[in-house]
Amino acid sequence: MSDERHIAFLRQAIKIATQNVESGEGGPFGAVVVREGRVLATGVNRVTAMNDPTAHAEMMAVREACRILGDFRLTGCEIYCSSEPCPMCLAAIYWARAERIYYAATRVEAVAVGFDDQFIHDEMAMDIAGRSIPAQRLLAEEALTPFEHWTAQQGRVHY
Amino acid sequence: MSDERHIAFLRQAIKIATQNVESGEGGPFGAVVVREGRVLATGVNRVTAMNDPTAHAEMMAVREACRILGDFRLTGCEIYCSSEPCPMCLAAIYWARAERIYYAATRVEAVAVGFDDQFIHDEMAMDIAGRSIPAQRLLAEEALTPFEHWTAQQGRVHY
């Protein structure tokens, strides 16, 4: 695709982000999933409207695109994000195996208007012991039971 | 809570993870959200059953707990995970502001049965330019428009 096409899709993500603020539905974020040069799905931030902390724009767009494709993978898809994906959304894009990300605002610009993206990036980079949400390991001796059932399961669908 | 209580909740997460494999519904993962010493919500991996790459056990449990509470925050809640949360789920737990994480299997053990948790952790730690899913910034001059509308919006709900 030409740069103009990429710019048009990213501009659409920015536009729906702004519209989402105007409608009072959620935060200033939008995302567009594109496949073979066409818009497959869009998403806007619905965290407060849906009482769902996972309802970021990229998550909504990824989930809708997968629903439309009937697949848990977005092979061959690109995602256009009005702002750099937060760690949750970035990891979701990895799990979905999307091909490429385009974004407009940076995490630094998101922090400047009150979002925690950089803080969460920083926490991810720390050892578990140093993080602000404490995490404790227990039951190491029983932990592998689900995995043993998984590897023994005939016809399991890997993802 | 006593250690026995924590162990019982984590054992429940492991149990539903194993049951999820047996039922063929998805991957070997379970999660339990606890509030004031009681189970508020549970979740199991439904990625392949729902064609939703974001349907990890922790995500399902966080979303269900928030739905029950009618809140996008899990203030005062603990989450018990059969396996160490992947970066997507960990970031979701941060966005939800949960208090504490208990887990059984480690990311290394998850990798050993075919899951990409460590790979995604490693990608997160890289500069954007070095990651395997390329990300390109465009439209820097238009990127702040949604944020400008956000900061100007009366009555915006921060999250």
Image (cartoon, coloured by chain):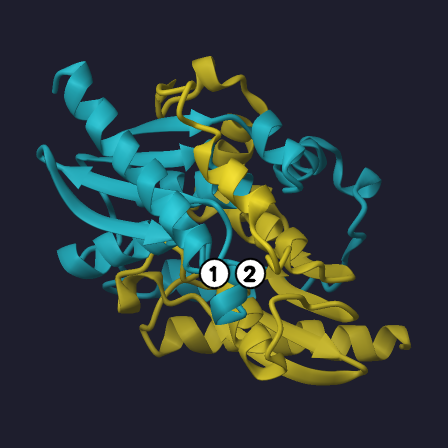
Chain colours: A cyan, B yellow
> Which amino acid does the dot numbered 2 rest on?
Pro
Visible residue check, residue A159: no
**Closer to us: B36 or B102:** B36
In screen coordinates, is B100 left or right of B28? right
Residue at position x 75%, y 79% in the image: B35
Give the distance between the C-alpha atoms of the residues marked 2 and 1, in whole angstroms: 16 Å
Crowding at dot 1, Cα within 10 Å, few <14 / some 14-19 / many 20+, comes out as some
The quadrant in which residue B81 appears is bottom right
Neighbourhood count class around disc 2 (C-alpha, 10 Å): few under 14, some 14–19, many 20 upward: many
Q: In this view, does A7 lie to the left or right of A114?
A: left
Name the image quarter holding the C terminus of chain B: bottom right
- Discs 2, 1: same chain: yes
Chain letter of the residue carrying label 1 = A
Q: Position of residue B140 (x, y in %)?
A: 42, 19
Against B88, residue B35 (above or below) is below
Q: Which quadrant holds the N terminus of chain B?
A: bottom right
Q: In this rendering, which labeled residue sits more in front, label 2 or label 1?
A: 1
Residue in the picture at 54% in, 64% down? A48
Give percent across and percent down for residue A15: 32, 40
Residue that mark 2 sits on: A53
Question: Regarding mark 1 in the picture, which secondary structure is present there?
Answer: loop
Residue situated in front as seen by the camera: A117 or A49: A49
Q: What element carries label 2?
A: loop
Residue type of the residue flagged with mark 1: Gly
Chain letter for mark 2, please.
Answer: A
Name the residue rendered at 21%, 50% in the picture: A41
Circle 1 is placed at which residue position?
A24
Q: Which of marks 2 and 1 is nearer the N terminus?
A: 1
The label on residue B44 is none
Q: Is residue A62 above or below residue A97?
A: below
Measured from the top left, where is residue B58 in percent x and y? 55, 63
- Residue B127 at what x, y percent from top left? 53, 17
